[in-house]
Image (tube, rainbow, N blue to C red):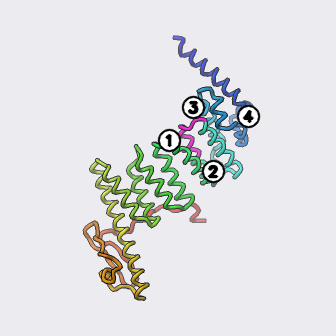
Amino acid sequence: MMRRPLTLLATGTVLAASLVALQIPLTHWVDSKPKLHQLTYLPSGDYLRMASLGYRALVADLLWLQAIQVMGERKLSAEEGHWLYDAVDRITTLDPKFVRAYEAGSHALCILVVMPEESNRLLEKGIQHNPQEWKLPFLLGINYYFELADDEKAAEAMAKAARLPGAPEGIARLAAKLFVSARSPQQAVELLAKVYEETSDENVRKMLEVRLKESLVERDIQILEQAISRYQAKYMRRPERLENLVEPGLLQELPREPFGGHYLYEPATGAVRSSEVAERMRIAARRRGQYQ
C-alpha cells in the first residue's frame, strides 16, 4: 500500500536534487509567464543529461512545460528566436527521443519568427535520433517547400517520410507532386511505382495507379516539350506534328499515353497535352509571402 507514495516521494526527491544540480535559478521559473530570455539560464544539453541522474525524460518534460509558456501566440524577435532554438536544442539533447519538442519547436521557429534554417536543423537532429518517426521528415519537407522554396529537397524529405511506418498514403502523392514541381517527374514515377509495389490494399493501389499514370503523363509531356525545343533550335521552326520528332532522331519513339489516349500537339504554340488528363500535374500550394 505504501509503495506508490514512497516511489513518488523518491522520484520527487531525485528531481529536486536534479534541479539543484542543474544550477537553474528557480526564481526565474516561478512566474507563471516566464520571460523568454530566462531560457538562457539553462546549462548545456550535455550537462543537463549528466545532472538529471537518470531522470532525463522527466526533467525534459518539466523544462518543456516552462518553455512552451514563453511561446504564446506573439511574434518573436530574431534574438528571442535564437533563445528559443537554444532552449529546445538543449531540451532535446537532454531527451533525444522527445519527438513532440522537435515538432512544436520547429513550428514555432517558422511561425513565431522566420528561422527556417534553425527549424530544419532541429528537425534533422530529431530524424537522426528518431529515424522511424515519419512526421519529422514530413515537416522538414514542408519547411523546404514553404519557407525555402526548394522543391527538390522538399520532395526528397517527403519521399523519405512516405517510406516510414505509419505514414499516410497521401504523403506519397504529395511527394510525387513536389518532384514534378522540381522538374523531376521521373523521380515521381519511381517513387510511386515503389510505393505501389509495396502496397497490398487494393483501394490504395487503384489510387496510386491513377497518380502514377498522371506522373507518367507529365514526364512524357516534358520529354516531348524538350524534343520540340531541340527541333526548333535545329530547324528554326516548330515541327508540324509530333511524329516529326522521331524522323531526325530527336526521339527513338513517341511515348504511349498511359491512360489509353494520345498526346495532342498545337504547332502554333508548341503546347502538348494528354487527351485523357484535363490538367497537368502541378503542386497547388502557394508560397508564404506571395501576396506581399
As shown in the figure, which amino acid type bears the numbered disc 3?
Ala
As shown in the figure, which amino acid type bears the numbered disc 1?
Asn
Image quadrant where residue 17 sits: top right
In 3D space, how far apart are the residues under numbered discs 4 and 1 (Cα atoms)? 32 Å
* Residue 14 x, y percent position in the rendering: 63, 22
User: Horizontal placement of 100 versus 35: left or right?
Assistant: left
Point 45% across, 65% down: residue? 181
Task: Identify the residue position indicated by label 3 in the image.
Answer: 57
Q: Earlier in the sequence, mark 1 or mark 2?
A: 2
In 3D space, how far apart are the residues under numbered discs 3 and 4 (Cα atoms)? 21 Å
Q: Which residues are magenta?
A: 94-105
Q: Judge the density around disc 1: few (<14), some (14-19), many (≥20) Cα neighbours within 10 Å.
A: some
Q: Are marks 4 and 1 in contact (CB under 8 Å)?
A: no
Q: Earlier in the sequence, mark 3 or mark 1?
A: 3
Task: Identify the residue position indicated by label 1 in the image.
Answer: 130
In 3D space, how far apart are the residues under numbered discs 1 and 2 (Cα atoms)? 25 Å
Q: Earlier in the sequence, mark 4 or mark 2?
A: 4
Point 66% across, 51% down: residue? 75
* Residue 115 x, y percent position in the rendering: 63, 53
Point 62% across, 22% down: residue? 12
Task: Identify the residue position indicated by label 4 in the image.
Answer: 28
Task: Identify the residue position indicated by label 2 in the image.
Answer: 112
Classify 19 as above or below 157: above
